[in-house]
Amino acid sequence: MSGNPSGVSFVLPVRNGEQWLDAVIASILVQADGRPMEVLAVEDGSRDRSPEILARYAKQDILRVVPGPRRGVAAAMNEGIRQAAHPIICQVDQDVVLEPGWMTALATALDDPGVAAAQGYYVTPPDGTIWARVMGLDLASSSVAT
């Protein structure tokens, strides 16, 4: 981590994600490395228990719930980005569990003035759907090692 680390805003679009929320939020919280950090959960019209789960975390000051525009994940993500307080934005899907150190590695890459964006490595669980496996292959093939 550099001497003057930039703050990080995690944007978590949520719609009917109750089965994953505890795991993804826990994985975001372990990213803390001393720099300023916030978690914005954009609740985009869930019909499951997602709003109650997010409210529980908000009550503990773990995250802030942002009402979503209810126009899909891209619009929800954009709403979270608009409300972000920090210059580094980490967009995390509601069903993605981050490995420890993920944010630090990406934020460190952004210390290089020639780098404008960074992407983490994606591992598809063995029991993932065909769509998850295809997305994992796409992301793995688009990765560039330097």
Image: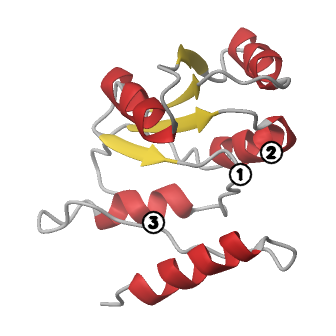
Q: Position of residue 108 (x, y in %)?
A: 35, 62
Residue under circle 2? 20
* Residue 53 in the image, given as x and y percentages of width and height: 81, 22
Front residue of this view, candidates 40 and 48: 48
Whether pointer 2 and pointer 1 mark residues with C-beta atoms closer than 8 Å, the reply is yes
Q: Which is nearer the eye, 52 or 64?
A: 52
Q: Quick check: marks 3 and 2 in contact, CB under 8 Å?
A: no
Identify the disc placed on residue 1.
Answer: none
Relative to residue 126, is residue 29 drawn left or right? left
Q: Position of residue 104 (x, y in %)?
A: 47, 58
Residue at 55 percent across and 62 percent down: it is 102
Q: Quadrant of the C terminus?
A: bottom left
Seen as rendered, the residue at the extreme front is: 71
* Alpha-carbon span between mark 3 and mark 2: 24 Å
Which residue corresponds to the image point at 84% horizontal and 26% vertical from the top-left?
A: 48
Query: Nearer the observer, disc 3 or disc 2?
Result: 2
Residue annotated with mark 1: 95
**Disc 1 vs disc 3: Cβ atoms closer than 8 Å?**
no
> Dot 3 corresponds to which residue?
105
Q: Earlier in the sequence, mark 2 or mark 1?
A: 2
In the rendered image, residue 31, in percent from the top left (x then y), is placed at 59, 49
Q: CA gap, disc 2 to disc 1?
A: 5 Å
Foreground pick, 4 / 66 = 66
Mark earlier in primary sequence (3, 2) = 2
- Residue type (three-letter) at the residue carrying disc 1: Asp
